[in-house]
Amino acid sequence: MSIASIIESLTAQGIHSVLTQFCDIHGVAKGKLVPLRYLQEWVEVGAGFAGPSIAGTGLGRHGKRSEYYGRVQIESLRPLPFMPGVAHAVCDGFAGGEPLSTCSRQLLKRQTKRLAERGWTLWVGIEPEFFLLKQAESGQWLGADRHDHLGKPSYDLKAIHRNSGFLEDMRASLTELGFDLQQMDHEDAHDQYEINYRFDDALAAADRYMLFKMTAHAVAQKHGLTFSCMPKPFASAPGSGLHFHLSITDAQGAALLADAADPLQLSGSGYQFVAGLLHHADALSALCAPTVNSYKRLAVSNSASGTTWSPVWKAFGDNNRTCLVRTVAGRVEWRLPDPSCNVYAAIAGTLAAGLDGIDKALLPPMACHEDLYELQSRGAVLPARLPSDLGAAVDALAADGVLIADLGEAFCSEFIGLKKQEWDEYSLQVSAWEMRRYADAF
C-alpha cells in the first residue's frame, strides 16, 4: 500500500495520531505523538528528538548530529486498543541522515544482516515473566494481591480468578494487536505471572516484546496495578526471567541447530552455538542481566515460595532448568536474560556469541544430566558461575573484544559507561541491612 492509502485506511478507522516509539539504551520505551497526516515525513525523515535527552545516544548538544530522528517502520503501524485514535509505530534511530550506531534496534538489524548473508534466519520465542505490584502510601512496594500467599503459588487458579480483569484485558488487547497467545499462568512467586505467545524472527520478536510491555503497563494502570519488570522485587521469592527460545533455519527452511538423531537433538552447529553462549556468558550477563537487582535473581538461594530455577552455573543440559542453557527438542533455551534488559541488545549479543561459537567451531563442556542445586547442597564440584554482581559483569563485557567488535564500539562504550556509573552509585549506598548489622556491633 502507498503511504496515502495507509493514511486513508487508518483515518477511516478513526486514527488521527501516530505514537512514534523507540527505546533508549536501557530498553525503556520512548517516543511522541505526531499527526497521522504527515506520515510521509515520519517515514522518510523521522520524528525529531533532542539527542542528548535520550540515554545512551552519545549525541552532542549542537550540530547536525545533535538531533535523534525516529524513522517509522511502516509495516509496524497498528491501532492501539488502549489509546483510541492512536496507531503505534516502531522507529529506527537515525542521526545526520545515517543509521545511529548507538540505536539498539539498528544493532540487532546489523546482527540479523550477518545471518541473512548466510541465508539463515534466527527465530526467537520470548517468555515474559513479571510482577503485579502496588505502592503503599508509605512508598513501600507491595504485591498487588494481598490474598496471594500460598506456599507453592505456581499455577494458582484462585489468584487467576482474582486478577481475571487484568488478564482478560491483556488477552483482548494483545489479540487485537496480532499476538498469537499460547498461555497465561501464575508463576513461582507471589504476584508473579507469565504470558506466552508465538515465536517470531529476531527483530519482530524484539519489537513485539516492546509492544507487550507497553500494553501491560497501560492495562495494569487501568486496574490500579503496576506492571513490574524488576527481576527480583522480593528477597524471599523467585525472580523473573525473560528466557529466549532460539532456533536458526537455513535458506531452505531446515533447522540448522537441530539433529533428531542426536541424543540431545542438537546438530554440530547447535553444539557450537551453545559453546559460544557459554564462552561469552560473563560478558553477556551485562547485556542480558543489566541491573544491580538482576544479580539478586542470579544467586544461589532458597525460596520461601515457589521453586528456585536461577541459572547461575555456566552449563547446558537436555531439559535441565538448573543450567544456563537448556536444550529442548533441537532448540536452545537461553535462560540468562531478565525483563530489565534492552531486548534488542540482549538478542544481538546472544546471536553474536552463538555465531562466534559456530565460526570458531567451539566445543561445549559435557552436557549436565543432574540437578545442579542438589549437587551444590552435597558439596560437589560445580561448573563455573556467572558474575555475582553488575560490576563484574560490566568488566567482563569491557574485556570481551569479540563481542565489542561485533556489536560496535560506539554502543558498547555508551552501555559500559552508563552501567559502570550505575554500579558505582549503588556501591555508595548504605542499606538498612548494613545499619542493622554494623551500627552498634563493634
Image (cartoon, grey):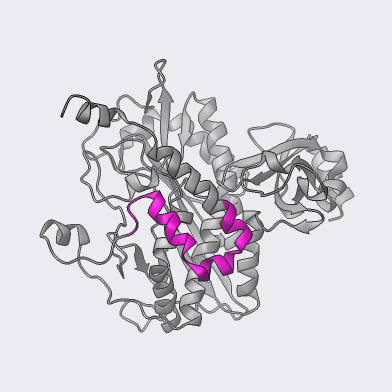
Q: Name the residue rendered at 48%, 72% in the picture.
A: 354
Task: Name the magenta segment's main secondary structure.
Answer: helix
Q: Is residue 389 magenta?
A: yes
Asked whether residue 330 appears in the rendered view, the answer is no
> Image quadrant of residue 413?
bottom right
Q: Position of residue 397 (x, y in %)?
A: 47, 60
Residue 364 vertical position relative to residue 303 in the rendered view, above or below: below
In the image, 299: left or right of 40?
A: left
Q: How many marks?
A: 0
Quadrant of the image for the N terminus? bottom right
Which quadrant holds residue 362?
bottom left
Percent across and percent down for residue 22 are 66, 46
Residue 429 lies, with reference to residue 406, above or below; the image says above
Percent coordinates x, y for residue 308 in the rendering: 25, 49
Give the residue at the far right of this rendering: 4
Front residue (pair 387, 108): 387
From the viewer's side, name the closer residue of 148 and 41. Answer: 41
Q: Is residue 146 left or right of residue 93?
A: left
Residue depicted at x 69% and y 42%: 52
Name the foreground residue: 408 vs 73. Answer: 408
Residue furthest to the top: 137
- Is residue 13 visible in this depiction of the protein? yes
Residue stretch in magenta: 386-414
Q: Is residue 115 above or below residue 439?
A: below
In the image, farthest residue toward the front: 442
Quadrant of image for the C terminus: top left
The x and y percentages for residue 43 are: 81, 51
**Who's the residue at 44% across and 42% down the image?**
424
Q: Is residue 190 covered in magenta?
A: no
